[in-house]
Amino acid sequence: MISKLSGFDAKKSAREIKNFKVQGANQIALYGLEFIKQYVAKNGFDSNFSQIINILENARPTAVVLHNCIELIRKNKTLTNIEELISSLKTSHKKNIDLKLILKNKSVIMTYCHSGEAMSLIKELAKLKKIFVYACITEPLEQGLRTVKDLKKLKIPVTLIGDNAAGLFMKNSDLVIVGADALRKEGVVNKIGTSLLAFAAYQNKKPFYVVANSWKIDKRKFFKIEERSPTEINKKLTHKIKDVEIRNPAFDITPWKFISYVVMENDVFSPSQILRKWK
């Protein structure tokens, strides 16, 4: 039986991950790993450990980074291993690449949702030349507002647009930069609506960049798109809808044919190069 204190804390941490108090695949993993580190420091790898990590792993089943880290912990149950995983994740947003290859003569960027890695790349691009950003609001939870606030703090010019306006403003954009929750053989898993943005970019011949890291390679055989509570949609409506089914998937999968490049830790890859990881 899991102890009251550790069980409560694990479930509380899982709820905070599930309720978007912690956002982004890397941040979810870091939050989960910090809890695991504290638990192991106090209790070691006791009989409750497996249940603890299962609770955290199942909080956001689509995001793969925490899953990949937990798999490594299962194989090497040491506190040192956990600390090394945390250290590696904290630097995974840093990209050792030639940023001029991305920017070239481009200066107008469209982005979607809020991604720590995408924001880090945009911040570095802004050091090279003056850029302008269109940020989609990202319904229903409006994570794009956080992106706008971060860009304003950095003094990067930004315009907030509705998700449905992305196609209209795409012709004024030079490129699209988004993050990723997982990279799978069938495509890039990211916030719901990313696939429509990628299709709009493809139709307008605009390069579509995905910023990720090696922790996001998802080789899980079984994969589930997380569906969230219908209240996230219904509570935003002036007139509440009754007796009608509301579907609220949190993610979608963008096929690789709509992706131009994937920016990883030390290089920029084409989709075909990323797909070799499954061979």
Image (cartoon, rainbow, N blue to C red):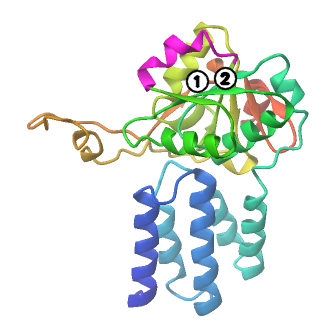
Q: 223 left or right of 96?
A: left
Q: Is residue 171 above or below residue 157?
A: above
Q: Which residues lie in the magenta part?
A: 162-174
Q: Is 171 contained in the magenta span?
A: yes
The span from disc 2 to disc 1 (Cα, nearest Å) is 7 Å
Q: Residue at x 50, y 19 (%)?
A: 166
The reply to whether discs 2 and 1 touch (Cβ–Cβ < 8 Å) is yes
Measured as percent of width and height from the top left, residue 70 is found at: 62, 65
Q: 39 left or right of 177?
A: left
Amino acid type shown at disc 2: Ile
* Of 163 and 187, the residue lying toward us: 163
Q: Element at badge 1? A: loop
Point out the frontmost of discs 2 and 1: 2
Q: Is residue 110 above or below residue 216?
A: above
Q: Residue at x 63, y 64 (%)?
A: 30
The secondary structure making up most of the magenta span is helix
Q: Residue at x 61, y 83 (%)?
A: 38
Q: 135 left or right of 125?
A: left
The residue singled out by tag 1 in the image is 255
Q: Is residue 179 above or below residue 204?
A: below
Measured as percent of width and height from the top left, residue 27 is found at: 60, 58
Q: Quadrant of residue 244?
A: top left
Measured as percent of width and height from the top left, residue 221 is found at: 56, 45
The residue singled out by tag 2 in the image is 259
Q: Is residue 70 visible?
A: yes
Amino acid type shown at disc 1: Pro
Mark on residue 57?
none
